[in-house]
Amino acid sequence: MHDTTALLIELGSVILVLGILGRLAGRVGFSAIPLYLLAGLAFGHGGLLPLNASEEFIATGAEIGVILLLLLLGLEYSASELVSNLKTQYPSGIVDFVLNAVPGALAALILGWGPVAAVALAGVTWISSSGVIAKVLGDLGRLGNRETPVILGVLVIEDLAMAVYLPLLTALLAGLSLASGSLTLAISLGTVGAVLYLALRHGRLISRAVSSDNPEMLLLVVLGLTVLVAGVAQELQVSAAVGAFLVGIALSGEVAEGAHNLLAPLRDLFAAVFFVFFGLNTDPAAIPPVLVPALILATVTTVTKIGTGWYAAKRAGVRTAGRWRTGGTLVARGEFSIVIAGLAVGVEPRIGPLATAYVLILVILGPLAARWTEPLARRITRKVKPAASAVPAGPAAETPASEAPASAPGATAGAAEA
């Protein structure tokens, strides 16, 4: 009885604090993720108020949080959208991977953490935060901008790549042999391909089988199916998160919309619990030693994400101002960086503190980069142009007249859209 009472008191206190922090973040205009991580650090071992009675419950809630995060992400996309984005955006996806995963891998190797930790840290620095970016686009009124489909296309490629990356990482963390790891990856790729095929060819039949006019029945069926598939995927070493993502892809139309509306509050609750749980398992004293590497990594990958966005927007024919906005918007890292780090802490415990510091930096810097990258670039360009024009140049060095009108409208349009 005493244990139950302590559990209720601790759990109620944690949820109440999360609610207050979420409201505070909403008023300031930032993501609540860094505040949830800080709350976890405060409640965890080595923090101000360690939790004992509710730690096991919070651990289970964290697993559900990851599953719901990936399920609702899958519900955002149809199979046809995924295939279309894969065909058109794959060059940008390759550039994104090279520019942003390589710094994380190199950092792990330089720190002496080994190849498995390098694969994990590569994922931490590679994947942008879909949740934070979606909120930033809405807050800045850019959902209708020319560059927004490019941003979403890059995010879709990253999310789809997770279906391959997570099983590979899970196999490496489990210490599977080359044959077992290859089999796991083959199972994952086969499952992803099969789900995409079924969703493309028979998506309506699947949605019809799950559909219900009763919200309670729809909630129970979708949630039960997702948890079941996630458990089976985990048993096959494919990753529970990937299983949940594939369930979301398989559902479409009104069923996907209804399930999204019903499950979004649950997602928000358990995702917050997940971030707290990650903080609980990170000793605050372990963060200062990795703060400098985290700052360096954040600086490098901020530049590389801006470069990624510039390249992707240029391929799509977006003007200069939109290219800068695309790059700045992609800077934020968040939920998936923490998910990846949470998987890897068993192999390399130092990844947890580094990932926490890294995400805290970029989840705060991300909205600022989205807002100010383009105006700052425009201001620097204006200062450079007069300096260049002040230098005498011969006829061969003069700027062709045809280039001047092309740059001016771009800057004007960027200013108007911002």
Image (spheres, helix red, strand yellow):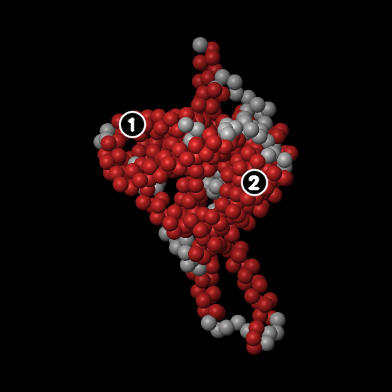
Apparent side of residue 30 relative to residue 156 in the rendered image (left or right): right
**Mark nearer the N terminus (2 vs 1):** 2
The percent coordinates of residue 223 (x first, y second) are 38, 32
- The image quadrant that residue 290 belongs to is top right
Q: Which residue is mark 1?
A: 221
The amino acid type, in three-letter code, at marker 1 is: Val
The location of residue 208, given as percent across then percent down, is 26, 39
Q: Is residue 326 visible?
A: no
Graded by Cα atoms within 10 Å as few (under 14), some (14 to 19) or many (20 or more), the crowding at tag 1 reads: some
SS at circle 2: helix
Residue 41, placed above or below residue 153: above
Give the camera-side residue of 176 and 152. 176
Residue 268 vs 43, above or below: the answer is below
Q: Quadrant of residue 116?
A: top right
Closer-to-camera residue (114/143) = 114
Q: Residue lying furthest bottom in this view? A: 395
Determine which residue is flagged by label 2: 105
In the figure, 61 relative to 197: above or below? Answer: above
In front of the other: label 2 or label 1? 2
- What label does residue 273 carry, if any? none
Residue at screen point 58% across, 44% down: 123
Q: Residue at x 31, y 34 (%)?
A: 218
**105 relative to 5 in the view: left or right:** right
Q: Where residue 156 sits in the image (x, y, percent)? A: 46, 50
Left or right placement of residue 320 versus residue 356 in this view: left
Residue 337 in picture, x, y percent from top left: 57, 42
